[in-house]
Image: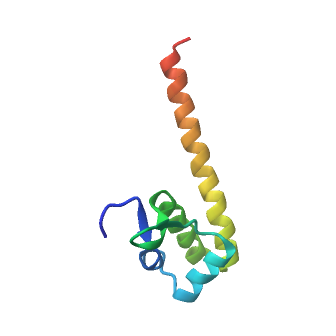
């Protein structure tokens, strides 16, 4: 796997230990954001890979269904986005020295 800004769906399925039908179901739920690249077709942005890995691990640990994994992935991503915003704001405040 080379360093790019997105990853192929088959690689996501392998990393998250998902079968083809499970991946299709998550796509139907809209749980996996996709970007279209001219040469490679549909891919998953790299910034969402850790979210899917965490959600898949929790799914396996607690024997959750795919619908619950989709909801979980959404919340994990929201938490990640909020943590990033918080970090950026803390950095801005530290630079201000008001």
Q: Is 38 or 95 nearer to us in this picture?
A: 38
The vertical placement of 69 against 90, above or below, is below
At 53% across and 71% down in the image, what residue appears?
A: 57
Q: In this view, does 3 lie to the left or right of 89?
A: left
Q: Nearer the viewer, residue 55 or 40?
A: 40
Give how far across and how far down residue 14 sits, in percent: 43, 79
Q: Please, is residue 71 above or below residue 88 in the view? A: below
Q: Is residue 64 visible?
A: no
Lateral position of residue 64 relative to residue 1, left or right? right
The residue sitting at the left extreme is 2
Whole-percent x, y for residue 24 in the image: 59, 83
Residue 40 visible in the picture:
yes
The image shows residue 15 at horizontal and vertical percentages of 43, 74
Q: Quadrant of the N terminus?
A: bottom left
At 64% across and 72% down in the image, what residue appears? 69
Quadrant in which the C terminus appears: top right
In this view, the residue in front, 41 or 65, is 41
Residue 86 x, y percent position in the rendering: 58, 36
């Amino acid at each position: 796997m080379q360093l790019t800004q997105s990853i192929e769906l088959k690689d996501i399925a392998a990393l998250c230990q998902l079968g083809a039908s499970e991946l299709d179901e998550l796509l139907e739920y809209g749980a996996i954001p996709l970007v279209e690249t001219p040469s490679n077709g549909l891919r998953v942005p790299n910034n969402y890979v850790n979210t899917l890995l965490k959600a898949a691990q929790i799914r396996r640990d607690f024997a959750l269904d795919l619908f619950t994994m989709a909801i979980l992935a959404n919340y994990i991503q929201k938490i990640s986005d909020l943590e990033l915003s918080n970090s950026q704001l803390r950095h801005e405040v530290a630079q201000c020295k008001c």
